Image (cartoon, rainbow, N blue to C red):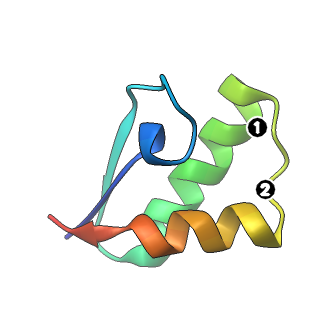
Amino acid sequence: MKAFRCGDVVPGCLREFLGQDQEAVLAQVGEHARRDHGLEPDEALVRAVQERIRDA
């Protein structure tokens, strides 16, 4: 399992994500970024998230 905390990239956001692998977490985070933050994931955002995904 992999985990990611949105607040590690977007200060103040409390959402956390769990997935079987990095790709599953990235899919969830991408949808969250669009829906809740109005962000379209670009290369820099994806890289920032990938660097902070950890084992759960």
Which residue: 68% across, 40% down?
33
Q: What residue type is labelled 2?
A: Pro
Residue holding disc 2: 41
Which numbered disc, 2 or 1, marks the residue that appears first in the sequence?
Answer: 1
Residue 26: percent from left, percent from top = 54, 64
Residue behind mark 1: 34
Side (left or right) of 9 relative to 54: right
Please, what secondary structure does the residue beneath circle 1 have?
helix
Q: With 39 as the anchor, is 20 left or right in this view?
A: left
Say if 56 sits above or below 36 in the image. Answer: below
Residue beneath the point at 71% across and 61% down: 45
Q: What residue type is labelled 1?
A: Arg
Question: Is residue 5 toward the left or the right of residue 50 in the image?
Answer: left
Q: Specify few, some or many for label 1: CA neighbours under 10 Å numbering under 14, 14-19, or 20 or more.
A: few
- Residue 39's place in the image compared with 24, above or below, is above
Residue drawn at point x = 78 percent, y = 56 percent: 41
Residue 5: which quarter of the image?
top left
Instruction: Measuring from the top left, give residue 15's x and y in whole percent.
Output: 40, 31
Q: Where is residue 7 in the image (x, y as percent from the top left)?
A: 44, 37
Residues at discs 2 and 1 in contact (Cβ within 8 Å): yes
Q: Is residue 40 above or below residue 22?
A: above
